[in-house]
Amino acid sequence: MSGIIYTPFLNYLRLAGAAHEKIIAYIGHNQVTSLDTHSFEDTADGQATMVVLYATISLECFIHNYASRNLGEKYCEKHIEAMNLHTKWLLVPKLVTGRSIPADHDGIALLQKLIKARNNVAHAKAVNFKTNTLEKQRQKIIDTNRLIVDTALSAFQCVGKLGKALYELDPKEPGAKLLAGFLDTPKYSVRRKPGS
């Protein structure tokens, strides 16, 4: 084995990090996550989709690479690839180290939120508004957007907590230590006005 590790997960984290910075700047400047006068991609809502997608892709890429290096590429192709991301983070460390990240771990809970937000982004469907359910449909869209932004703001806590948990199981894994470093990022949340 060469000891050289291809790390595309870092590139995805950089994309998520750049979008995360734009979210913070947008909210800091506008005091809201989006304005109707701005293009979606320029808003905090738009940038949150980038954070959610690329943070999820990064965690998927990392755990798959970790499994491939430790369990073998053929084993991964046959047994690991088809697993969902949540299961991979629970099962792969156990297969490699003999111990697993507990299912009730904070990082796993944040991962589940991240996956839910990613699914809301990736599987968004057009809505045919109906006048008799307009307010209910509008509220569902608002709630989904809030989930995505809130999850984007906590995405690096998820990355850090999963990295720290894996590093505690496998202290020789440099990528886990690198992911754990994201625990040093500030915690952000959006303050909501009452009734919004």
Image (cartoon, rainbow, N blue to C red):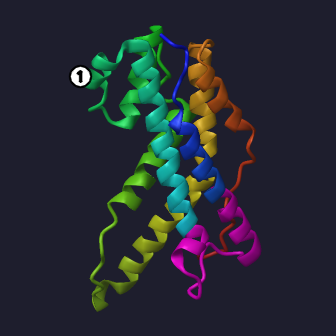
Q: Nearer the viewer, residue 99 or 64?
A: 64
Q: Is residue 89 visible to us here?
A: no
Q: How many marks?
A: 1
Q: Is residue 191 visible to us here?
A: yes
Q: Main secondary structure of the magenta part?
A: helix
Residue that numbered label 1 is attached to = 78
Q: Is residue 94 left or right of residue 81?
A: right
Image position of 46 with respect to 102: above or below: below
x and y, in percent, of residue 77 in the image = 27, 25
For the C terminus, give its image quadrant.
bottom right
Q: Amino acid at mark 1?
A: Lys
Q: Quadrant of residue 78?
A: top left
Q: Under tag 1, what secondary structure?
A: helix
x and y, in percent, of residue 21 in the image = 69, 58
x and y, in percent, of residue 49 in the image = 50, 61
Image position of 1 with respect to 4: above or below: above
Q: Which residue is drawn at the image coordinates 62% and 44% (left, top)?
A: 156
The local crowd at label 1, few if under 14, some if 14 to 19, many if 20 or more residues have their Cα within 10 Å, is few
Determine the residue located farthest toward the bottom in the rendered image. Answer: 131
Q: Is residue 77 left or right of residue 160?
A: left
Q: Which residue is drawn at the image coordinates 46% and 28% (left, top)?
A: 63
Image position of 125 with respect to 5: above or below: below
> Residues in magenta?
20-45
Q: Is residue 31 magenta?
A: yes
